Amino acid sequence: MDKLWAPWRMKYISQSKKRGCIFCNALREKRDETWFVVKRSRFCFVMLNIFPYNNGHLMVVPNRHIAAPEKLKDEELLDINKTIVRTISILRKVLKPEGFNVGMNIGEVSGAGIAGHLHTHIVPRWPADTNFMPVISDTKIISQSLEELYSRLIGEKHAWREV
């Protein structure tokens, strides 16, 4: 058996699991560095996905705990969509991806890991960013730590101001 060493995961494995919705906890606790929240706006916030599909995988999350996009108010929709656009713009500048996957998994059967609190995934993509590892060994290589990415993204404070 091949081993892929990932000692940084020990912190996650050994920590006590928080109760409740992780998005509501992140919003309420206001410990942005702990939760990897890179931007807060009036009706939503942006945070890193701690189980990323790809490097730079962010989520835009409404402040209200709702499960369906049709329950969003117009002002929330505008703020969320402007935040999605600004997030893509900042990721273009910081990571220089050649494309993006942007979307929502609505409901548990769609693959939503947190079905009760709507959120939009923004996943940067590059040519050959997937290789044989996920297919052969069910292993995904993420090339940058969450801490390093978080630091780079919050360093773009002037770019976030437009949201």
Image (tube, helix red, strand yellow):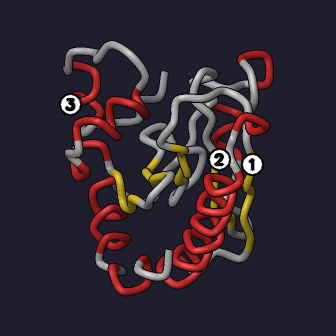
Q: Which residue is mark 1?
A: 103
Q: Regarding mark 3 in the picture, which secondary structure is present there?
A: helix
Whether the residues at callouts 3 and 2 have beta carbons within 8 Å, the answer is: no
Q: Regarding mark 2 in the picture, which secondary structure is present there?
A: strand
Q: Is residue 86 left or right of residue 99?
A: left
Which three-letter amino acid code belongs to the residue tagged 2?
Answer: Thr
Which three-letter amino acid code belongs to the residue tagged 1?
Answer: Gly
Residue located at (20% from left, 30% from top): 11
Whether the residues at callouts 2 and 1 have beta carbons within 8 Å, the answer is: yes
Among numbered discs 3 and 1, the one appearing first in the sequence: 3
Q: Is residue 93 left or right of residue 145?
A: right
Numbered tag placed on residue 41 in the rendering: none
Residue 20 location, x and y as percent? 38, 16
Numbered tag placed on residue 120 in the rendering: 2
Q: Residues within 10 Å of mark 2 (few under 14, many from 20)?
A: some
Q: Is residue 79 above or below residue 14?
A: below
Q: What distance separates the C-alpha of mark 3 from that of mark 2? A: 26 Å
Q: Is residue 129 above or below residue 138?
A: below
Residue located at (63% from left, 31% from top): 137
Among numbered discs 2 and 1, the one appearing first in the sequence: 1
Frontmost residue, 48 versus 127: 48
Q: What distance separates the C-alpha of mark 2 from that of mark 1? A: 5 Å
Q: Is residue 85 left or right of residue 27?
A: right
Residue located at (74% from left, 71% from top): 99
Q: Is residue 153 left or right of residue 110?
A: left
Which three-letter amino acid code belongs to the residue tagged 3?
Answer: Lys
Residue 47 location, x and y as percent? 43, 51
Numbered tag placed on residue 11 in the rendering: 3
Q: Residues within 10 Å of mark 1 (few under 14, many from 20)?
A: few
Q: Regarding mark 1 in the picture, which secondary structure is present there?
A: strand
Among numbered discs 3 and 2, the one appearing first in the sequence: 3
